[in-house]
Every structure is written in C-alpha cells, then in structure tokens.
Amino acid sequence: MQDAEEPMGPGQLNWLASIVEDGTASRDEAEQLLVEFVRQVDRGNVMPRMLQHTRDCFAAFLSKKKTLMPALSEGREKPLGVPIATLEKAFGLTRVAPGNPPVDRDTQTEAAMEVLQRRLSGDGFKVACIEVAATRKARGDHISSSSQVGTAWAQFQFEAVQALALARIVEFGATQWTPREVDRLNHLFWGKLWWTPPGADAKARSAAIRAELDDPSKSPEDAAERVEAVRLKYDAPFAPKNPRRKAVRPRGRR
C-alpha cells in the first residue's frame, strides 16, 4: 500500500484513477488512491484529478451505476455499464467488471514451471497437470484445474524453462540440469525453435537464424524451412533418442 507520508506524483495518480475507471484495478491499487486522498486533504492541497476521481466514485454509488471505460487487457473495446451497490464497488475495492479477472503472465508461468518440474521428475502430461492443479487448489492459487494448468503449460513453456533455470541459479549458483533432466528437456522441447539443447552453440545458432531471416536475396516463402535447416545443423548432434517432434524436412532434400 502507498505510504501515507510519501506523496503520489500526478502520473501515478492519473494511472491509478484510470484503472479504477476501467475496472481493472486491484484492491491494493484502489486503496492507494484512498490513502493518497486522505494525505492530500490533511495537507490542504488536493489535486484536481484526485477531486474528480473521488467525485466520480461517490456519484457512481449515489446513482447505483457506473460506466467502465474500455479495457483492452480484458477484451473490452467499448464502455460497459455495471450496477454499483456498495461504496467498495464504487471506489474499485471490489471487482465490478463481469467475469473472472485475467490471470497475469507470472501466475501462468508459475503454473507451467510446476508442470515442468513434474515432467522432469518423470510424470506424463496428464498426471503432471492433475497433480499441479490439486496442489494449487489446496494452496488457494489461481489456475487450479487440470485444464487451466494444461493451457498454461501449452502457452508458457519457454517462460517455464527460463523461470526454473533462474530458480536453479538462485539456489545453486548455476542452472545445474542433471544428465537425466537434460535428456527429458530435449525430449519435451526438441524441434521448438526457442529451445537450444544444452551443449549446442546458442549464440552461433541465433546469429545464423537471424542471417537467414535478414538475407534480402532469399525468398520469405521458404523462410521457415531455411530456419529449420539451420536449427538442425546446430541441434542435430544433441538430438535425443526417438525425439517426440518430427523435424521439418527442407524442400529438395531426401
């Protein structure tokens, strides 16, 4: 929460007021405005934007309705009228937008990382999702059904690997993948462009891919196949046995 003795700048005040207006503010963010309002009143210098915000919140409570501004983060492109029954809703302390709040990337990455940890220990996809979902539900976390966990895993695999690698660095001072984990990682992510097998020259691989994409003399129509050929050049020596993903065979090669 905003410290009562720390003045809030006009930019922060305007941003907080705007996310209360579009219904995306968290309770903590809405409370910061109330703390700042008290601070400004105590000092006898209330900013015009603060007066407008406070007036609008009271007006919404008195009229029992409020118009939420568009919020692209929630897929809302037009203003939306919502009922206001309490002061908490009027001031944004309680969510008024319909539906569940969107889950942030960090939370989805966390769920995907927990799946990755179980996959590295040997669990299959379904078992990993069920176990992670049960653990998250017991903790009261967001993303607590197996389908939600599976979606997070499908969309945030790259972030999950990065997050787990960072956690290993913090704990051990290095990534510390075991040989068994390296084999599992290669089986899980073989063929994905963002995955560089441990041991492969990631810097040279990335530079070669960029060179293929930036070469003006080559057609963009076969860019994907050319990039796949570069990937295979650098990754093939570290290929797992029986990789799960089939590589794309460039045209003209057998």
Image (tube, rainbow, N blue to C red):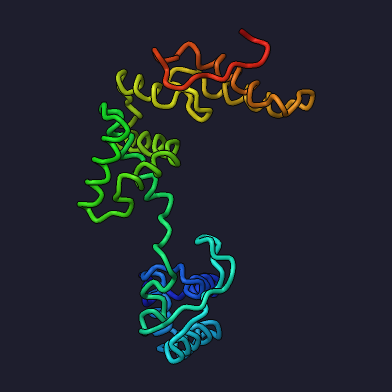
Residue 11 versus residue 152 in the image, above or below: below
Q: Residue at x 52, y 79 (%)?
A: 67
x and y, in percent, of residue 233 in the image: 56, 14
In-image side of 205 versus 216 (left or right):
left
| Displayed quadrant of residue 71 | bottom right
Res 9 seen here: no
Q: Nearer the viewer, residue 102 or 47?
A: 102
x and y, in percent, of residue 104 in the image: 42, 54
In-image side of 204 versus 151 (left or right):
right
Q: Quadrant of the N terminus?
A: bottom left
In-image side of 110 versus 220 (left or right):
left
Q: Quadrant of the C terminus?
A: top right
- Residue at the far top in the pictured view: 254
Q: Residue at x 45, y 76 (%)?
A: 7
| Displayed quadrant of residue 122 | top left
Res 194 seen here: yes
Q: Residue at x 43, y 83 (%)?
A: 37
Q: Nearer the viewer, residue 8 or 230?
A: 230
x and y, in percent, of residue 36 in the image: 42, 79
> Number of marks in the image?
0
| Displayed quadrant of residue 84 | bottom left
Q: Residue at x 40, y 55 (%)?
A: 103
x and y, in percent, of residue 35 in the image: 38, 79
- Residue at the far left in the pictured view: 138
In-image side of 67 versus 95 (left or right):
right
